[in-house]
Image: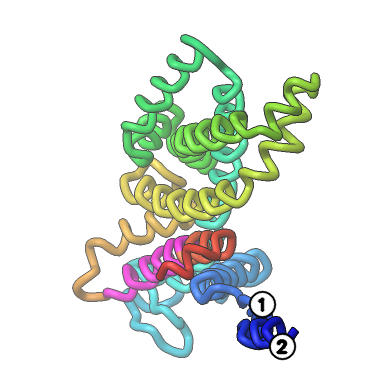
Amino acid sequence: MSAGIEIRSALPEPIAPAPARRRGLPVSLLIGLVLLAAVGIIGVVSLLWLPYDLADTTGGRLEPPGPNHWLGTDKLGRDTASFVMVGTRIALTVGLSSMAIAMAIGVIVGLIAAFATGWVDDVQSSLLDVVIAFPTLLLAMLIGAMQGASLTSAVVSIGLAASAVVARLTRILAKGLLRRQFVTAARTSGTSWLRIVFIHLLPNMWPTLVVTAALIFGTAVLAEASLSYLGLGVPPPNSSLGRLLQGAQSTVLTAPWGAVAPGVVILVIVLGANSLADGLRERFDPTRRERR
């Protein structure tokens, strides 16, 4: 009897589990949200109010930043801040629209490719690899050159070029999920493929797809600026950030504010999109943060 008591007393006391620590939002996610929110506010305000009309040339030629013209004026005496605000709105429009096209087409094509088998699957996979081998900007330039310079052609060309990346990612994710037991059980039980897509595939893929969408948004804004700089993007009188950089190229040494302002906006948008994507990746994959 006493030996039993001694044995039990020698056992270690059970350790109470530590309370679960609540994880806050990742810093990169907050940074991305703040940067994109600030740029978004500028774009919305440009719809309602501008410091000067875009055709107003009453300002002095290449006037430096001051109380009358916050970001100075260009070589025609027009207010740079007004053009940057409109350019910000155009950049956000192109980025969001291109992202929507890329995600819609890419997810649909990727899901179709995931359900394909045999030589059909091999052909689709090879075609996606060939399209992805070309840089997104190069594909956008080719499509934009064929369609002509316009806001619509810029959105469509960038969206189509980026959709190949989304399609390949969707195919890989869906192929992996189709091998899981719960999906196999649903297929053998006679569940339709449409129901499998909306109940089993998309709910398990959306965290990765959201991260990809954020990256595509930043890439689309940068691609549109590059196209406009080369004369293949949004044509005048639209105030694209890339076209502002092109116009300020000849005066960058004497009036650098004309190039710095649109360049900073592009940098903020791309940095915000990348920070948002990194934060979303950390949010959906806590183990990644623990490995750091």
* Residue 23 occupies quadrant: bottom right
Q: Can residue 155 be seen at all in this image of the molecule?
A: yes
Q: Residue at x 50, y 34 (%)?
A: 172
Q: Residue at x 67, y 84 (%)?
A: 3
Q: Main secondary structure of the magenta part?
A: helix
The residue sitting at the top extreme is 119
* Mark carried by residue 20: 1
Q: Residue at x 44, y 38 (%)?
A: 149
Query: What x and y, as percent, mark residue 248?
Result: 30, 64
* Mark carried by residue 119: none
Q: Residue at x 61, y 29 (%)?
A: 178
Identity, as a three-letter code, of the amino acid under mark 1: Ala
Q: Is residue 217 above or below residue 191?
A: below
Depth check, mark 1 against mark 2: the one in front is 2
Contact between marks 1 and 2 (CB within 8 A): the answer is no
Q: Which residues are magenta?
A: 256-274
Quadrant for the C terminus in the image: bottom left
Q: Is residue 250 above or below residue 172?
A: below
Query: What x and y, as percent, mark residue 74?
Result: 36, 70
Q: Nearer the viewer, residue 281 or 249?
A: 281
Residue 263 among those drawn in magenta: yes
Query: What x and y, as percent, mark residue 137?
Result: 35, 41
| Pointer 1 local density, CA inside 10 Å: few below 14, some 14–19, many at least 20 | few
Q: Earlier in the sequence, mark 1 or mark 2?
A: 2
Give left or right: position of 77 versus 204.
left
Query: What x and y, as percent, mark residue 78?
Result: 43, 70
Q: Tag 1's secondary structure?
A: loop
Identity, as a three-letter code, of the amino acid under mark 2: Ser
- Disc 1 versus disc 2: distance between alpha carbons? 40 Å
* Mark carried by residue 2: 2
* Residue 21 occupies quadrant: bottom right
| Pointer 2 local density, CA inside 10 Å: few below 14, some 14–19, many at least 20 | few
